Image (spheres, rainbow, N blue to C red):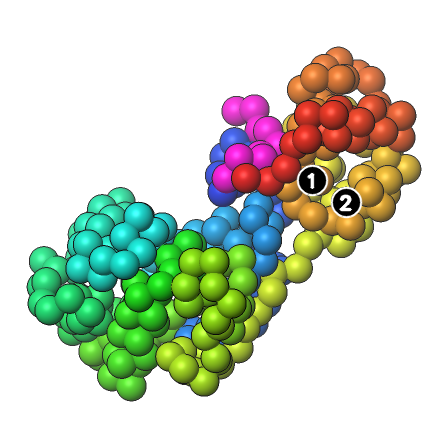
Amino acid sequence: MARWFEVAGPCERDIHYMLPPTARLPSLERFIRQRNYFVIHAPRQTGKTTAMLALAKELTQSEQYAAVVVSVEVGSAFSHDIAGAEAAILDTWRDTIAVRLPADLQPPDWGYGAPGQRIRSSLQAWAQHCRLPIVLFIDEIDSIENEVLISVLRQLHDGYPNRPQNFPSSLGLIGMRDVRDYKVASGGSGRLNTASPFNIKVRSLTMRDFNAAEVAELYQQHTDDTGQVFTEEASQLVYDLTLGQPWLVNALAKEIVEELVTDTKVAITVEHVNKAKEVLILRKDTPE
């Protein structure tokens, strides 16, 4: 099956060129063994979700954890409605878990209690029901704000001392900003202090960009599949232009091999990279 350079979301190993997704976050398995809660932040299209999906799959396949990536993005439509946000979030989590975890690790029916308690009580019920410790990665955490964000963080804080039998054993918040930078009010200047309401995090991790060797390694996968070579100079120029930002690294390659140089017998050179750069600039392409 053909593989492609991906610029529109999480990578899938069978159809996309991709590097080992967790290599740029080497400390996570230690944090998980220590039952830690942590924050992972980086700009869009850096590979956060791809890495977390891969790690969750590995952890679940190890038969030591029930690990899954869920999102709170649907709650962003309910910035002042805690009950509405909780219901939307938990319904989406239920659907996601049904797809990503085997039947014997599924949660029981969510027990909707009082608004402001539903996420905590539902995660508690799942942890009590599940035969394995739960590792939960909550994606798009900074898409919610105002009262909803405060409520979610406080519920996680409230359940934390009860782990692992009665709450997720380890938990990661995934977003574009560190927890101390989450806005309390839309358009406001208020900030959440790290001391409250999520002072339980052990570490905030920034997912790094590719280094020059990793850019060359990614492009080598295309060469291995198609025979089309990226010259050493071309690969180095991509790194120099992008500083290894994953979306830009993929976007330049995608423009080159799918539009500018479709003949795989033709090697990719510095000139091709410069042409692709100009195309992206003129189109004003940016990570979404």
Count of marks placed on residues: 2
Q: Secondary structure at mark 1?
A: helix
Q: Which residues are magenta?
A: 1-9
Identify the main secondary structure in magenta. loop
Which residue lies at the image location 52% right of the left edge and 24% below the top edge? 1
Position of residue 174 relative to residue 11, above or below, is below
Q: Secondary structure at mark 2?
A: helix
**On the picture, is 224 further left or further right than 36?**
right
Disc number placed over residue 47 in the picture, else none? none
Looking at the picture, which amino acid does disc 2 mark?
A: Thr
Q: Position of residue 10 (x, y in %)?
A: 49, 42
- Of 36 and 282, nearer the camera is 282
- Of 156 and 237, nearer the camera is 156
Residue matched to label 2: 242
Position of residue 219 relative to residue 191, above or below, is above
Q: Position of residue 71 (x, y in %)?
A: 35, 53
Whether residue 101 is visible to the viewer of this picture, yes or no, is no
Disc number placed over residue 248 in the picture, else none? 1
Magenta stretch encompasses residue 192:
no
Mark 2 or mark 1, which is nearer the start of the sequence?
2
Mark 1 crowdedness (10 Å alpha carbons): few <14, some 14-19, many ≥20:
many
Question: Quick check: marks 1 and 2 in contact, CB under 8 Å?
Answer: yes
Which residue lies at the image location 56% right of the left edge and 24% below the top edge? 2
Position of residue 6 relative to residue 103, above or below, is above
Q: Dividing the picture into quarters, in which one does residue 135 lie?
A: bottom left
Which residue lies at the image location 23% right of the left edge and 58% below the top edge? 81
Whether residue 50 is visible to the viewer of this picture, yes or no, is yes
Looking at the picture, which amino acid does disc 1 mark?
A: Leu
